[in-house]
Image: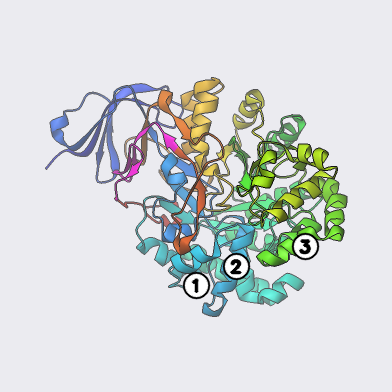
Amino acid sequence: MAEFDVLIRGGTVVDGTRVPRFVADVGIKDGVVAQVGGRMNPADADQVLEADGLVVAPGFVDLHTHYDAQIQWDPYCTISGWHGVTSVVLGNCGFGFAPVRTEERDRAMLTMSRTEAIPFDSMKEGMIWDWITFPEFLDTLERIPKGVNCISYMPLAPLMTWVMGLEAAKSRRATDEEIGEMQRLLHEAMDAGACGWSTQRLGEHSVQADYDGTPMVTDIMSDNECLALAEVLAERDEGFIQITQFTGDLQQDLDFQSVLAATAKRPILHNLVAVNRNNPSIHRDRLKWLEECNARGERVFGQAATIRASFTFTLEDWNLYDSSPAWNYATTGTHDEKKVKMADPDVRQRIIDEIDEAIKKLGQTQALGGPIEELMIQDLAHMDELEQYVGMTVGQVAEMRGCHPVEAMLDLAVETDLAAEFLTPMREQNDEWMAEMITSPYCIPGVSDGGAHTKFLTAGSYPTDFLMWLVRDTGRLTLEEAHYRLSYLPARAAGFHDRGTLTEGSPADVVVYDLDALNLTPEWAGEIVHDFPGGEWRRVQRPEGYRWILVNGEVTFQDGEATGSTPGKLLRHGRG
């Protein structure tokens, strides 16, 4: 019998711990790193991967995904799996599919069709739905083929809906008895292997609303309900919390998350920290808050938006203007209902009147997608009479037509049967500020939203962009620091036991790549592929430069092509 199942020879090892890089062989046996260092005999291995001149590093850990549905038909959780991600966390933002009663499955999928913009027809055809309770959902995750490892939160939206009923959860606060039942079910989920719980609290005018335009159940949940569930984690001394919160008063929201961390006595993953190109105080103030929390013993980590990505979208699918009630109204309903609303002068005027307040709602200097007048017009359904506008900004079209940019955008949408395609401009990012943010002891890169917003976002490519931009092209980070941030730190923050390093005894999740050859294809906006169930399409962005990706010691991708191997595991309690 061979000493090693796989031998990776002669690569530059960057092990994720910040130890300086070194050239070494890596021997893998039974899914575990058996030996690192020295020159090993290739005759002692069943499979030899020649890595001379390549980087050998731990697989990336993606903490913020929505692959709960997609993992059932795509075991590699692409886009993330293409880009070296070997472990993912499911159930973010309080959204998911368990517990869900049989008769409520369609409603659960409708919810995700808007708030996370996952195609309903794909979910309808591609999901297995052989569970009802959360422990049963984990059993399904364990059973199905996987090309990545996964852990899952207990998402609070289905939990609250299960206990209270949907309408009650959207209209009143839970009784003491209902809170007690939620706590019991959370204990049950944690016993089964959940990693904690997640929630989105965005208030009455949620930035990410339900399919009918109303707030998500968790958007209006009370502090008391959150703290009661935090007490479960404190009692168990296990698990962690992911929270996305902005209800209109930023300081009040941060103060509450500090109280939440103190109550849970467990790590909090705070969404999100971002660099604004014009105002460094935005990320610096958030970093100061993270430092103050941790100085008090409150373990709060900031999930940092690091991807340089554009949105390419149509108003048929776009949902990220929901902080404006008028935009929310105009972009919900059937295709024909949307067209009628978008053509209505009163609706248009309401949108125009609400723009400033909607931007303020996001706590930034611009709404998601950027100022409407700066949007580029990428495609107008190949209509000859409109082709002159392709390549222009919405602001330029508005000037030509003598109208407000909102009116110009809506005119083009209606005139093309909602097929007009808008591109957010690729902004010059400040790499100095980005490095300042990401080298905080408490910041983790990513926020891929993998599996969500499938028709206008390709942020699952963030590990590749991170290495290209901040390591290779600008030199702002060393390879050692980059791999610590991409693997070791997220694994430790989120309770992955033994993952995130390339050290002897650790599970053999490995990326082998050529740093000089790393690239994104297409470079910015991605490309359309028709590979989802139900005849649906999505926008993707593939990488170049990854020679091999291994999960639990088996090669899952070679030169960008899936091998068909599915060695991924459900990591109950982060172990396995």
Q: Is residue 479 above or below residue 285?
A: above
Element under disc 2 = helix
Residue at numbered disc 1:
133
Residue 65 shows in the view? yes
Residue at numbered disc 3:
341
Element under disc 1 = loop
Residue drawn where x is 86% and y is 56% of the image: 350
Residue 301 shown left or right of residue 557 in the figure: right
Q: Residues within 10 Å of mark 3 (few under 14, many from 20)?
A: many
Residue range corresponding to the magenta coloring: 543-564
Residue drawn where x is 65% and y is 57% of the image: 316
Q: Earlier in the sequence, mark 1 or mark 3?
A: 1
191 or 315, nearer to the observer: 315
- Tell me the distance, in whole angstroms, between the alpha carbons under discs 1 and 2: 19 Å
Q: Is residue 15 above or below residue 80?
A: above
| Res 515 quadrant in image | top left
Provide residue 488's location: percent of width, then percent of height. 47, 37
